[in-house]
Image: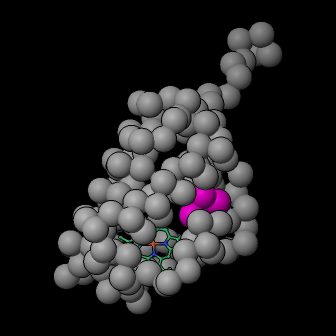
Amino acid sequence: MSAETAQAPAATPFERVGGHAAMRAITDRFYDLMDQDPAFAELRAIHAADLSEMREQLPLFLAGWAGGPRDWFEANPGKCMMSAHGGIPITSDTAGQWADAMTRAIAEVEVADREIAEAMADVLGRMAKGMARG
Ligand code: HEM
């Protein structure tokens, strides 16, 4: 392709959804829901009492996963999110709660591109359900 016909690279899902601010807003809403809504009590119970580290790590993971800055992946070389959850007792109920909380969080926060945000919720929900072993 000549220089004249070369196109700018397509925006990543990370950029389209609204960058770090959107990832942080989604994560904060997700853990607020987990903390406050009894529908997610079972999911909340398997997490640590203090979610502040998770509020730092999840947006960084989501950023790299969605094609943005890869800080989380560089800090955790070779770490696979599916196997990182291998020691956690995830049932179809709690995986469903994770997927529901993420879907609601994404629906409730302001994002730059609703369509890509919903696609993200869908794929994350499938990943969560894929982690269930009971
Ligand atoms: C796409 C799905 C998921 C993603 C992207 C995700 C992401 C993460 C991240 C980034 C961490 C921080 C630990 C680390 O950096 O290694 C973590 C930890 C954890 N995740 Fe997930 N997770 C997912 C699904 C689930 C599901 C379905 C459950 C339970 C039903 C779950 C329960 C936990 C627990 C209990 C921890 C340990 C944190 C603590 O001790 O509080 N995760 N997850």
Q: Which quadrant is home to the C terminus?
A: bottom left
In the image, residue 120 sits, relative to residue 39, either above or below, namely above
Reply above or below: 129 against 10.
Answer: below
Q: Residue at x 55, y 30 (%)?
A: 112
> In the image shown, does 106 or 11 lie closer to the viewer?
106
Q: Is 62 above or below relative to 109?
A: below
Determine whether, in the image, residue 113 is placed left or right of residue 1.
left
What stretch of residues is rendered in magenta? 57-61
Q: Please state which of residues 82 and 28 is positioned toward the viewer in this rendering.
A: 28
**One can see residue 25 in this view:** yes
Return the x and y of residue 5 as percentages of the image width and height.
71, 12
Q: Nearer the viewer, residue 103 or 109?
A: 109
Quarter occupied by residue 47: bottom left
Q: Position of residue 55 (x, y in %)?
A: 59, 66
> What's the residue at 60%, 58% (across, down)?
59
> Residue 25 location in percent, x, y?
57, 49
Residue drawn where x is 30% and y is 74% of the image: 41
Residue 33's x, y, as percent? 40, 60
Q: What secondary structure predominates along the stretch shown in magenta?
A: helix
The quadrant in which residue 119 appears is: top left
Residue sticking out furthest to the bottom = 87
Q: Is residue 130 visible?
A: no
Above or below — where is 111 with respect to 130? Answer: above
**Residue drawn 55% across and 80% down?**
50
Q: Residue furthest right?
A: 3
The magenta stretch spans residue 1: no
